[in-house]
Image (cartoon, helix red, strand yellow):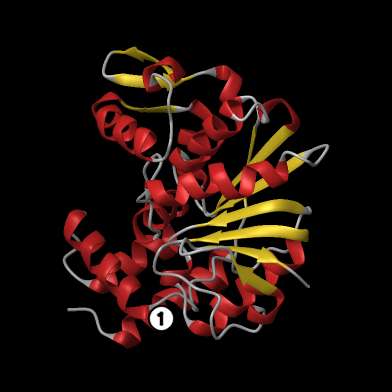
């Protein structure tokens, strides 16, 4: 059994030894994942796990991969992507150059979804997509642009539900159970580690997507990250969050206007 004091000790170790700050993450979610990791790796006690994390930088990579949330899919929430197609991209099309930031992008399925939207809107050539995550392991998957072939049927259905009219399979090459997405899409994606807890703004963007990441942060950290996004958006830029996330009750709420029922806001101040 792991109690809250154990979790606090481990989080202090991570910050003091490695600089990883998980202290503002939702404690209940972190605790569940640490318990799961103990079970998966068969640690006889929490003390054994803590010793391993403290003494083995190689194991730290696995720890970070397991306790950070890496669940994503292509064209997740199709009505959200339909709104991007119909409401946001026509406005971005008027700009000479488009910068889009996928913060906490995980393995990148949504980054490639956006690249497909841009290509179909004939905007990919003047766009750059910045894909960032705390976890360097998942970014390797973004870099390769390779996803399991058995997900493609589901992704194709979501793509069509989002308003896609092309043959989804034209965007990838199937080989040995894997789908490798076209180089034309990946060459517009810039990949870098970025820690939403401690790193600052690094560019000015026309659209920032951070979906289903804030739900794992406590209220103070959510406010800090939303302030970071506000500072990183161009005037009249767009911010897109996950279905259970909101700008309501945040310090930047008055600076944005929600477009519609989808979780997309336009910066108005």
Q: Which residue is mark 1?
A: 9
Quadrant housing the N terminus: bottom left
Place of residue 59 in the rendered image (x, y in percent of width and height, measured from the top left): 39, 52
Describe the element under mark 1 as helix, strand or loop.
helix
Question: Which residue is at the front of the view, 213 or 265?
Answer: 265
Q: Quadrant of residue 199?
A: bottom right
Residue 54 sits in quarter: bottom left
Residue 30 position (above or below residue 99) = below
Residue extending farthest to the right is 96
Which residue is located at x 74 percent, y 52 percent?
Answer: 205
Image coordinates for residue 212, horizontal then vertical, percent: 43, 61
Residue at 62% over, 49% down: 88
Vertical position of residue 155 compared to residue 174: above or below: below
Question: Residue 191, percent across and down?
Answer: 62, 39
Name the quarter where the C terminus is drawn.
bottom right
Instruction: Judge whether 232 appears above or below 15 on screen.
Output: above
The location of residue 139, given as percent across then percent down, is 51, 40
Q: Badge 1 local density, few (<14 within 10 Å), some, or many (20+)?
A: few
Reply above or below: 63 against 151: below
Is residue 192 something that shows in the picture?
A: no
């Amino acid at each position: 059994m792991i109690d809250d004091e154990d979790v606090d000790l481990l989080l202090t170790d991570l910050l003091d030894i490695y600089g990883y700050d998980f202290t503002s993450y939702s404690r209940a979610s972190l605790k569940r994942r640490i318990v799961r990791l103990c079970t998966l790796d068969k640690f006889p006690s929490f003390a054994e796990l803590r010793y391993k994390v403290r003494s083995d930088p190689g194991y730290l990579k696995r720890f970070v991969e397991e306790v950070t949330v890496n669940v994503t899919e292509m064209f997740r929430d199709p009505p959200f992507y339909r709104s991007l197609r119909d409401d946001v991209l026509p406005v971005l099309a008027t700009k000479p150059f488009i910068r889009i930031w996928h913060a906490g992008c995980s393995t990148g399925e949504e980054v490639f979804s956006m690249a497909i939207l841009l290509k179909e809107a004939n905007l990919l050539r003047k766009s750059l997509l910045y894909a960032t995550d705390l976890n360097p392991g998942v970014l390797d998957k973004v870099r390769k642009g390779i996803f399991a072939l058995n997900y493609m049927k589901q992704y194709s259905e979501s793509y069509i539900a989002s308003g896609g009219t092309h043959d989804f399979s034209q965007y990838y090459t199937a080989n040995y159970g894997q789908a490798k997405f076209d180089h034309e899409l990946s060459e517009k994606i810039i990949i870098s580690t970025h820690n939403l807890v401690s790193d600052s703004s690094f560019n000015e963007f026309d659209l920032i997507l951070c979906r289903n990441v804030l739900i794992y942060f406590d209220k103070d950290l959510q406010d800090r990250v939303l302030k970071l996004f506000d500072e990183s958006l161009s005037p009249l830029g767009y911010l897109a969050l996950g279905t259970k996330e909101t700008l309501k009750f945040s310090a930047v709420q008055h600076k944005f206007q929600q477009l519609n029922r989808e979780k997309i806001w336009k910066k108005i101040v």
